[in-house]
Image (spheres, grey):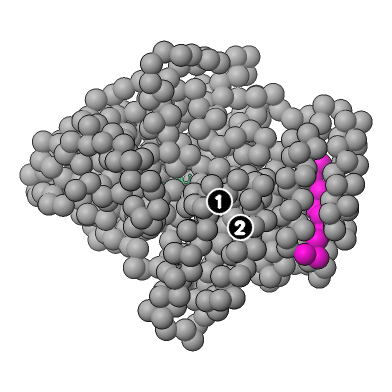
Amino acid sequence: MEYTKLTPDILQKLREIVGEENVLTDAALLEPYGHDEVTDPAYHKLPEAVALAENAEQVAAIIALANEYRFPVTPRGAGTGLACGAVPVYGGLVLSLEKMNRIIEINADAMYAVVEPGVRTSDLQAAAEAKGVFYAGDPCSGDSCFIGGNIATNAGGNRAVKYGTTRHQVYAVEAVNPQGKIVRLGARLQKQSTGYCLEQLVIGSEGTLGVITQATLKLMPLPQYSVDLLVVFPGAEEAIGTVQKIIGAGITPTCVEYMDNITIKSVEKYLGCKLQGSDKGNYLIIEVEGVSEDDLDEKSIALDEICTANGASDVLVADHDKIWQARKAFAEAVRAESLIVCKEDVVAPVDQEPLLLAEILRLAEKYDLVTRIASHAGDGNIHLNILKRPEEDYAEWERRVEQNQQELYAFIYAHGGRLSGEHGIGFKRKRLMEEFTEPEELAMMKAIKKALDPNNILNPGKIFDIE
Ligand SMILES: Cc1cc2nc3c(=O)[nH]c(=O)nc-3n(C[C@H](O)[C@H](O)[C@H](O)COP(=O)(O)OP(=O)(O)OC[C@H]3O[C@@H](n4cnc5c(N)ncnc54)[C@H](O)[C@@H]3O)c2cc1C
């Protein structure tokens, strides 16, 4: 793909749009915008400049300028992504939304919030709670990622079992389309059947179909009663096999998370603490909400019975803060072990998850891979981290990782799964997306991109390539 470089003339026009102080060109200032949370330098690329927009009109003017001069624009939130979606693979301009960070409205009576894209997820959660309402989106990176990034990636996280992913929290989005027009998509309605559902097309499009400049989000009543159970299973397959039984029993837990034993030990080492039952096996962390103490007790007893009948050795009431600190430290603990990690984000139907886990373990042995596994088990989403040993040759390790991917993805697609449950495709999984997606489905996606972005200006080189 041929694009125009950001000439002094273009940079001057950008300064006129966002102001002198909001255009960065100094190499040291550009560096943080050349990567996301993928630490492997093979996936880093510096932009030619960064523009920090302060409102939708500025975003629209930048996209219009990009179309006029034909330079690529990569939208960026907090840069916590794990698929290199915010990495400017063709150079050009990174458009940062970090300064658009206002919570415009929290309406506790009508239960909605209006926010700009640069609002930190945990800040929205806290602001909602302060008004007695609840924002259900909860990725493990919530203390650092932005709502705009969550919407662009359709972020999942821990509470998706009960509340769904980010797309289920969104009533409407305001976005700048790839041709530089501000569009308002969706409405604050419980239902509608009024043409194409365009807001849902932009959600999860990883910044390729629009720059999100505002969102109207759903809020809910604050859960009144909840408990976290820590269930220890000697066997991995028993642990994962229990999830479908919990769901089939009519208990809708808020979260069901899985951590294998070696990952639990890794987190213990990283946090410098001892976790309950860590010598006995693998964890299911189950959070459940109730309408009263009695309701919660009944659900806890039912969960205990199901887990014990399926091979659990311990069912414990967990310290909420401690157990979630441990679960959320997974990524950092792995990073402390190795900076070169292949992070798989595979997803299968929940009833197929035991088979998927068994296949993951079989392939890891076959290809002699060091793995750490945690999963959003309640929605079939397994995070498989494959670590390079310090003494291993990079190219040889990568060859085995790729062989593993080919076999694993073939298995997943044959069992109704997909290659990403929540992190997205970005730049990192593009080749595999092209290989494993049904040709007609891929052709429809490309046709939509070409129709909306004929100059391929907005986040090019992500999800798939346009010929
Ligand atoms: C420790 C850790 C834990 C994590 N846990 C989870 C988890 O539990 N669940 C989960 O889903 N993810 C998780 N992630 C991944 C990541 O945090 C999410 O993908 C998050 O939604 C990215 O938000 P961001 O603001 O950092 O976006 P960025 O990384 O900046 O961008 C991600 C993508 O969104 C696009 N984008 C960003 N903002 C906009 C916008 N305003 N308009 C249009 N496009 C935009 C970018 O172009 C890019 O394609 C985790 C990451 C880390 C490091």
Q: Which structural element holds mark 2?
A: helix
**Residue 379 pos. (x, y %):** 63, 44
Give the main secondary structure of the magenta stretch: strand
In the image, the residue with mark 1 has its CB under 8 Å from the nearest atom of ligand 1: no
Tell me the kind of residue under disc 1: His
Quarter where residue 459 is shown: top left
Query: Dot 2, crowdedness within 10 Å: few (<14), some or many (≥20)?
Result: many
Q: What residue is drawn where x is 72% and y is 67%?
A: 261
Quarter where residue 174 is shown: top left
Q: What residue is drawn where x is 60% and y is 45%?
A: 349
Q: What residue is drawn where x is 44% and y is 42%?
A: 153
Is residue 184 located in the magenta-colored stretch of the structure?
Answer: no
Above or below, 408 against 50 in this view is below
Query: Dot 1, crowdedness within 10 Å: few (<14), some or many (≥20)?
Result: some
Instruction: Give the residue at mark 2.
Output: 356
**Residue 142 pos. (x, y %):** 56, 45
**Residue 304 pos. (x, y %):** 88, 47
Tell me the kind of residue under disc 2: Leu
Query: Which segment is the magenta one?
Result: 226-235
In the image, the residue with mark 2 has its CB under 8 Å from the nearest atom of ligand 1: no
Instruction: Give the residue at mark 1.
Output: 415
Towards the viewer: 102 or 378: 378
| Observer able to see residue 24 | no
